[in-house]
Image (cartoon, helix red, strand yellow):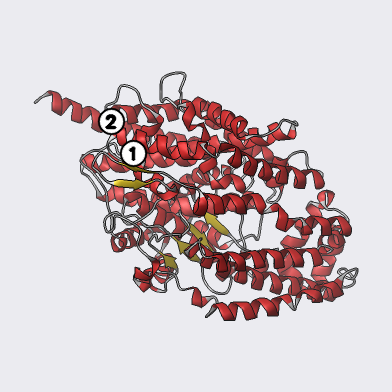
């Protein structure tokens, strides 16, 4: 019932503003206008604590409806409204605590506040565990008759029908109560992994060829893996993954705990597998997942073409995995100050209309965004749209590079999705599925790329931008599907009764990675010492999450092409899509926007565009080679 639509992206785990700073500065030194204003949620920690206690005092009221939920339409409405009010306030409380904790993960006070909210949510979930079984005991005709008699129930139609749709997987009231009580324990693998990876893992420090000291924590690795010097890149990869390998079995135990949690819930709810359980929450056919993996495997020649272009541009005899993030256009080092990124995004989204742009200006002007890194701050980036009647928030770790500009555009896409949904939908249908969330974010990225290519004609800069787009396809479509294939294999192995230890997990990951990168064919070597890379990916602690990056990218490609080509009605359909929230299932919401994810068409359009981009890159390279030969 909790709305905490928090989404963070693996592709933007970058840090400090390199154009400004060499090391992350203390939070207190950051300009206040470039920090988020959590006082919009609660003016102080004391106000938060008071609101928390007041909310906890409301929990027992739900018990008055036990055995009476369907007594009458009015009784059902009263129950739904109480549950909705509690969920809305709980989401607000959780958002404040978690974002305060993310400002500095070393501060135990805010970790404790977040833990308090998890405990409270578990307590309420236990008390309200009878709701699902009581509603599921009814039928669609009865529920529809109640809605017809009590119009106030209309906002809850989607929820009520979804309970009936999944009634075969609903348990008895005592069993649901046990599952609810298990929720706090079930989050342990993810919480342990987050604290260990972000605050306590002893990361190495190396000296680069220019004498610079490089602290290789997660953010440092993401920065220094793109060093132009190849020996530096190799040293970064070897040191960082070496540190992870030192704790391979610890990471393995954390991951095994997460997979065991997924299996427990799938089996308890009588699903065929963890995959069925995860996808059924949004009524996504499992065929969509399997088709994505199948389509990507068939299209690995397109990925290998990208990697061969990378090899050609780097001028190396053999491409290595440590080269995949290296800059390919030596004369171009795209950097953007934060104000420059702001202006670029505002210009790029103009095709979506003035109202869309004005909402983005509010995000900048009203301190919705926390911009720069600081010691202890959570790495990466995310948008949190869980405060329904406040506004969305964005966490960044702005580094002054082009990738940070695309990250800003990406997270603003999430934020505009939350903004439009929260503004348009009543609370019960304002929350949207992750399956559609990444469409909004990658749509913004596509519009940004269109703007950049339209305005920049210099061959070297265009090469840099085109290669950046290809890196986006590689990291979002291919890499995330690689992750999805690994995640599926991981669960299938455990569901078959095989043990999961750190070394077993690493071997599974490495075998899949070597297939994707064409290791055996000599396309790009993926050394076994990098098999531990899975331990660096936090998204594996959100079951079957990553595939949605890939599906969303292909969906947004289809939408962006319609918008940029000026197709009549494309903008209006897109705004309706952003405003739909969870009023329908995600597959149906996308169909209304003109994208059918049950077909391979969006994927095929994306591959076709990627190959067109590579055609242009090769033409520019051939032109440059010809000019060089003529000298």
Q: Nearer the viewer, residue 544 or 432?
A: 544
Q: Nearer the viewer, residue 45 or 203?
A: 203
Q: Quadrant of the N terminus?
A: bottom right
Residue 535 in the image: x percent, y percent? 54, 41
Secondary structure of the residue carrying numbered label 1: helix
Residue shown at the point (66%, 67%) measured from the top left: 117
Q: How much space separates mark 1 and mark 2, taking CA atoms?
A: 10 Å
Q: In the rendering, which numbered label is found on residue 313?
A: 2
Residue farthest to the top, as pictured: 521
Report which quarter residue 125 is drawn in. Answer: bottom right
Q: Nearer the viewer, residue 535 or 81?
A: 535
Q: Which residue is mark 1?
A: 467
Q: Nearer the viewer, residue 226 or 336?
A: 226
Secondary structure of the residue carrying numbered label 2: helix
Which of the two discs, 1 and 2, labels the residue nearer the N terminus?
Answer: 2
Would residue 548 be seen by someone viewing this image from the given angle? Answer: yes
Report which quarter residue 610 is drawn in. Answer: top left
Residue 554 in the image: x percent, y percent? 50, 42
Residue shown at the point (76%, 66%) measured from the top left: 123
Query: Mark 1 or mark 2: which is in front?
Result: 2
Are the residues tagged 1 and 2 within 8 Å (C-beta)?
yes
Q: Residues within 10 Å of mark 1 (few under 14, many from 20)?
A: many
Residue 34 lies left or right of residue 286; in this view the side is left
Residue 151 in the image: x percent, y percent? 76, 73
Residue 427 lies left or right of residue 479; in this view the side is right
Would residue 137 be seen by someone viewing this image from the given angle? Answer: no
Residue shown at the point (65%, 61%) measured from the top left: 583
Residue 233 lies left or right of residue 45; in this view the side is left
């Amino acid at each position: 019932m909790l709305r905490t639509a928090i989404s963070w992206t693996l592709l933007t785990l970058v840090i400090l503003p390199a154009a400004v700073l060499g090391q992350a500065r203390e939070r207190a030194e950051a300009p206040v206008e470039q920090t988020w204003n959590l006082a919009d949620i609660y003016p102080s920690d004391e106000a938060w604590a008071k609101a928390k206690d007041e909310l906890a005092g409301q929990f027992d009221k739900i018990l008055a409806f036990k055995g009476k939920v369907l007594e009458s339409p009015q009784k059902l409405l009263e129950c739904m409204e109480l549950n909705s009010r509690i969920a809305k306030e709980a989401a607000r409380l959780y958002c404040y605590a978690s974002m305060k904790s993310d400002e500095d993960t070393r501060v135990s006070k805010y970790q404790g506040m977040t833990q308090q909210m998890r405990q409270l949510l578990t307590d309420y979930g236990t008390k309200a565990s009878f709701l699902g079984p009581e509603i599921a005991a009814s039928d669609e005709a009865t529920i529809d008759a109640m809605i017809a008699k009590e119009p106030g129930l209309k906002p809850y139609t989607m929820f009520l029908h979804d309970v009936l749709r999944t009634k075969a997987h609903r348990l008895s009231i005592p069993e649901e109560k046990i599952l609810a009580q298990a929720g706090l324990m079930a989050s342990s693998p993810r919480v342990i992994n987050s604290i260990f990876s972000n605050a306590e893992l002893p990361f190495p420090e190396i000296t680069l060829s220019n004498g610079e000291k490089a602290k290789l924590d997660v953010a440092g690795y993401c920065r220094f893996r793109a060093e132009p010097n190849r020996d530096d890149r190799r040293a970064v990869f070897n040191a960082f993954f070496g540190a992870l390998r030192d704790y391979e079995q610890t990471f393995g135990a954390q991951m095994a705990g997460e997979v065991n949690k997924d299996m427990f819930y799938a089996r308890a709810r009588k699903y065929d597998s963890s995959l069925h359980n995860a996808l059924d929450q949004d009524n996504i056919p499992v065929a969509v997942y399997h088709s994505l993996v199948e389509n990507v495997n068939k299209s690995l020649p397109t990925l290998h073409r990208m990697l061969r272009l990378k090899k050609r541009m780097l001028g190396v005899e053999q491409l290595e995995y440590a080269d995949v993030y290296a800059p390919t256009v030596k004369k171009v080092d795209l950097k953007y100050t934060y104000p420059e990124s702001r202006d670029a995004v505002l210009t790029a989204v103009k095709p979506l209309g003035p109202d869309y742009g004005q909402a983005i200006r509010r995000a900048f002007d009203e301190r919705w965004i926390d911009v720069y890194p600081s010691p202890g701050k959570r790495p990466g980036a995310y948008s949190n749209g869980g405060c329904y009647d406040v506004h969305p928030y964005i966490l960044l770790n702005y580094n002054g590079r082009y990738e940070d500009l695309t990250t800003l555009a990406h997270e603003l896409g999430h934020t505009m999705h939350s903004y439009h949904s929260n503004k348009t939908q009543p609370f019960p249908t304002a929350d949207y599925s992750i399956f559609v969330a990444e469409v909004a974010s990658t749509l913004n990225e596509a519009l940004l790329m269109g703007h950049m290519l339209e305005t920049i004609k210099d061959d070297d800069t265009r090469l840099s931008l085109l290669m950046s787009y290809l890196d986006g396809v590689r990291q979002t479509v291919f890499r995330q599907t690689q992750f999805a294939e690994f995640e599926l294999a991981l669960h299938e192995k455990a569901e078959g009764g095989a043990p999961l230890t750190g070394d077993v997990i690493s071997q599974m990951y490495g075998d899949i990675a070597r297939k994707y990168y064409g290791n055996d064919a000599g396309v790009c070597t993926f050394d076994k010492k990098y098999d531990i890379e899975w331990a660096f990916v936090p998204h594996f602690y959100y079951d079957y999450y990553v595939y949605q990056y890939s599906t969303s990218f292909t969906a947004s490609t289809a939408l962006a092409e319609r918008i940029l080509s000026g197709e009549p009605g494309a903008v209006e359909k897109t705004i309706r899509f952003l405003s739909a929230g969870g009023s329908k299932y995600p597959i149906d919401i996308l169909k209304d926007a003109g994208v059918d994810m049950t077909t391979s068409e969006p994927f095929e359009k994306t591959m076709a565009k990627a190959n067109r981009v590579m055609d242009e890159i090769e033409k520019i390279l051939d032109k440059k080679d010809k000019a060089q030969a003529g000298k």
